[in-house]
Image (cartoon, rainbow, N blue to C red):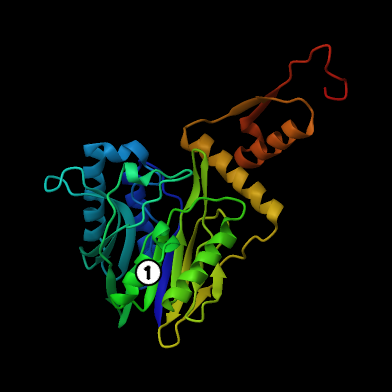
Amino acid sequence: MIRLALAQHDFLVGDIAGNLAKAQSLMQQAKSASAELVIFPEMALSGYPAEDLLLRPGFQRASIDAVNELAASVHGIDVLIGHPWSELGRAAGQRFNSVSWLRDGAIIGQYHKQCLPNYAVFDERRYFTPGTEPLVIELKGCRMGVIICEDAWETGPALQSRAAGAELLLIPNASPYRADKLAAREQLLCQRHADTGLPMVYCNLVGGQDELVFDGRSMLYGRDGVCAATGPLCEEALLLVDYDQEVGCLQALDWPVALTDPLAEIYRVLRVGLHDYVRKNGFKDVVFGLSGGIDSSLVLALAVDALGADHVHTVMMPSRHTSGLSI
């Protein structure tokens, strides 16, 4: 039996020092829970999407320094964490969306994302060079392969990982929400299982960033190809998993109950997106025009739920067309 921990958490874009401290704290929590590997989301050390911060040499150096500092603090547990990686000095302009496997004070393996999305809200080809090589690391006799987010939407990286000897597939993600996204993820993971026959651990980011909301809902797929568990929606959690490598079974340990009502799901995502946009940009209060109608009343309810009533202010500028009922 191997115990894994999924750090389904929110990592602030640009706050490398804060994200490093958070990763170290979560690593210690996972270690205290007897986990042998803690898995972080895609680009956890830099936040996602870091956009043009990735073009700054100082940001690139700070990201590399953070990976090395985290690696130096790793003892008694393995860590798989996402971050930008740059080949400074040797290959100018080579930047990668990467994960590093950390063990006993060192980086023992690194994987560069191969499939770079460049559609809808994604423009990763602007910033990154695609990787070409698999990463398979052995832990307690189990050979674990790694792919990143969009790699799971294509066939090649998962098959390459299996060909390199992987028995379990680990998938760190920064996958944003849309109304039908969970079903789409379930369908693609079923397809990757059909391609490879491998059990899969899918760890997703949480939190709002500008117009995006990352909804978490990390997932486990056993060797039988059935979804064994889904993590909570838009909620930070350190999710513990026991993996029985003999039968390929992934067992979620006391995961929070997943939200299933579609309207409640959308409301929760809107609330998180509003809260994180306001707080992450350093605002304290919001003000907006209230008409008395359903639209602005819904905005008022969202704002109060997201920020607290003391931080929400409304104004009305009545005209001769404003009804007494509205006032």
The quarter of the picture where residue 306 lies is: top right
Residue that sits furthest to the right in the current view: 324
Residue at 44% from the left image edge and 79% from the top image edge = 197
Say whether residue 243 is visible. yes
Say whether residue 31 is visible. no
The residue under label 1 is 158
Across and down, in percent, residue 143 comes to 31, 78
Q: Amino acid at mark 1?
A: Ala
Q: Report the front residue among 293 and 17.
A: 293
211 lies left or right of 126: right
Helix, strand, or loop for circle 1?
helix
Across and down, in percent, residue 290 comes to 73, 26
The quarter of the picture where residue 317 lies is: top right
Task: For the N terminus, give its image quadrant.
Answer: bottom left
Task: For the C terminus, give its image quadrant.
Answer: top right
Q: Report the front residue among 70 and 148.
A: 148
